Amino acid sequence: MITSRPSDTFQPGDVLNTTYRIEKILGRGGTSEVYRARSEINDRVVALKVLSSEFSINDDYLALMKREEEIRDVLHDAVVRYSEISRTPDGHVYLLMDYVQGPSLDEKLKSGGMSADDLMVIAGRVCEGLVAIHARNIVHRDLSPDNILLRGGEPGEAVIIDFGIAKDANPGAATIVGNEFAGKYAYAAPEQLSGNSDARSDIYALGALLLATFRGKSPIVGKNPMEVIEIKAKPLDTEGVPEPFRSLLDKMTHPDPEDRFQSAQDVLGDLAPQFLGTVVVGQNSIIPKASAPKSSQSSAPETKPRKKRSGIFAVLGLVVLLLAGAGAYVSGALDGFITPPMQVADPYILIAEGGRDGSPNVTGYVPNEITKSALEAKIADAGGVAELNLASGNIHDNWAVGVQYLIENALALDEWRVSVEGNTFRVSGLSNDAQLRDIVLSNLQNREILGGFSGSIEVLLGPRILSTSSVEQILQNVADCGSLSQSNPPDGGYPIGSSIIITGKLSSTQTRGRLFDALDAVAGDRKILIGADVLSTDECHMGGFLSRYATGDFQIIFSNGLDNSIVPSGQFAPGQNPAIDVVIPASVVDGFIWVSIVDVSGNVFHLLPNTNRKENSIANLRNGSLEQLDVRVAYGFREATGDSSKIAFNVDNTLGESKILIFHSSAQLFENLRPVSESLASFTEALSSEALNSSAQIHSLDHRDLITIQ
């Protein structure tokens, strides 16, 4: 279950535009969050997708949200219905869609999988939805188990959700996030790795996710880009899958799109009637399942990916920009008529880097003297060296402008590398400034300048190593309920991609939010996990006392009040009668002890001294003995019967930890006896006030937990 965080855009109970009351958060993504909300007007439950604050003012991301909302024109029960896009008075843009109650296939996968028959029903249902969206030249591109929900848990009620990276394949149409790689590597079709996708890519992804759900485990993708490419080039392993499900999956997931089902309608035609519902075959016509034809023609977009693509595969990166456009032989094509011809470079490579290991440098080919001089000057201004050669090659006519633009933006980063092969580029780097990183990423998505290129971009948010001392300083500044600790901090600091785990105690959820924000400001691309418990103010005060004084050598022994058998764990079930002994070490012969128990509900009971048992002088308790001394402070009921000075108690059904405290002081801890029981607030106030005996130097404070279990 996903729980709310202080950093979430909305909190449960918030009302948007006087209409939609937030009930809970459903999920978080890189640019948006999804909530369940309820209309205050008609009580309708909806799903609400909101752009994160930093993206709500970005025109590019607003355009993506608007494009996603336009899918509302697809009317089919197997496709989530979008209804409207709105903006709150404080500028947050949100998108409303149907709320689908039911588990995702990802939940089914993680709980052990599903039967072949149920999955073939799901295949038919999802393909019905794909027929509807493909008929409008829309390709989903991100079908995965978490994007298929089962309304009411029924396979025949599967619903496709999340069209955030869908592609409009109509000729000349804009796409929601471009023609780049999109989706999840585990389920993406092989051709998507190089930026190509059409309706057959959705068919592959559906087959891959159905196979994973049947097996109850996610596919093995590979540990590096080359492994991803190699694995994707092979057929999926369907060994052990029963027929006819196996043959269906083999045809859906063939690595070559030409050998796959060519349309979702073809998949429906291959399914037996018992696995089919109604099939939408066009924008306005519906055919019952019994008469659904097996089409040999694809109703999908006509654009088909090429089988092979030379150059660098765009398989990693935060943003990938694979743009449609034919390559051209330029920059030197006519040089033979006016100057001696340049060499022809194949492959046409340029590599520039800088930042981490010193001054920048650039090597490789450029198409003309103007570009060569401009790059040499740019690198020289940055204190680096350029070694460039003139050559012609198979490059786009905007190549020179685009390469200069890539390098100029990369130079702003703390570390960077730009590699270009032909019309494909890869930019990688690191920035210690989040705002600068976002600006560079936005600039590198400029399709007007980079329109002739395909490529990938990966800019990490640093620092590369975050010192444990800088994290410790934040913990000291924020801690308000005892000390906070870093759990297993790595030697030498936190590398990028690691997790910062914080343990300890905090006084409020507001403090927890401040701690998260303070760490987030320096963490960069690292996970922050705050495992600190939130306590009450009084519990925090008590924690402060526990950390203020050194521990001594006093011990606490628990036993069963019925038979005096030792209970080493200190764990007792409701109704049991604990007996408690304090062990005074032989080395302690003077002073006074004060023994109290703070129970799980916040009440304090004073075991020694109290109004019925006032003697707590160690010398008097010893009565001449110089050996280790056991002093019983809580008794079994039979032992305490008839003696009002002996305290006995049963454990109630309030589960949790009660804390036994032993103060050792040079004089009486308080001028006067405390009542047998009082609130934790009253006791902590007394410990902090003048009620504490000014001559009562506290030598040690020992403690142990008594744990109530079922």
Image: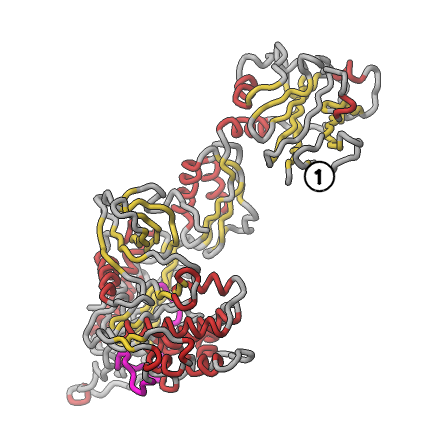
Range of magenta residues: 294-318
Q: Residue at x 31, y 63 (%)?
A: 80
Q: Image quadrant of residue 137?
A: bottom left
Residue 487 in the image: x percent, y percent?
A: 55, 46
Residue 458 in the image: x percent, y percent?
A: 37, 63
Q: Image quadrant of residue 303?
A: bottom left
Whether 311 is drawn above or below 94: the answer is below
In this picture, residue 203 sits left or right of residue 487: left
How crowded pointer 1 is (Cα within 10 Å; few <14, some 14-19, many 20+) is rated as few
Looking at the image, which residue sits at the far left? 338
Q: Image quadrant of residue 146?
A: bottom left
Q: Residue at x 42, y 54 (%)?
A: 525
Can residue 354 be seen in the rendering of this structure? no
Name the residue that disc number 1 marks. 569
Whether 354 is drawn above or below 398: the answer is above
Q: Nearer the viewer, residue 141 or 40?
A: 40
Q: Quadrant of the C terminus?
A: top right
SS assignment for the magenta stretch, majority: loop
**Label 1 sits on what residue type?**
Ser
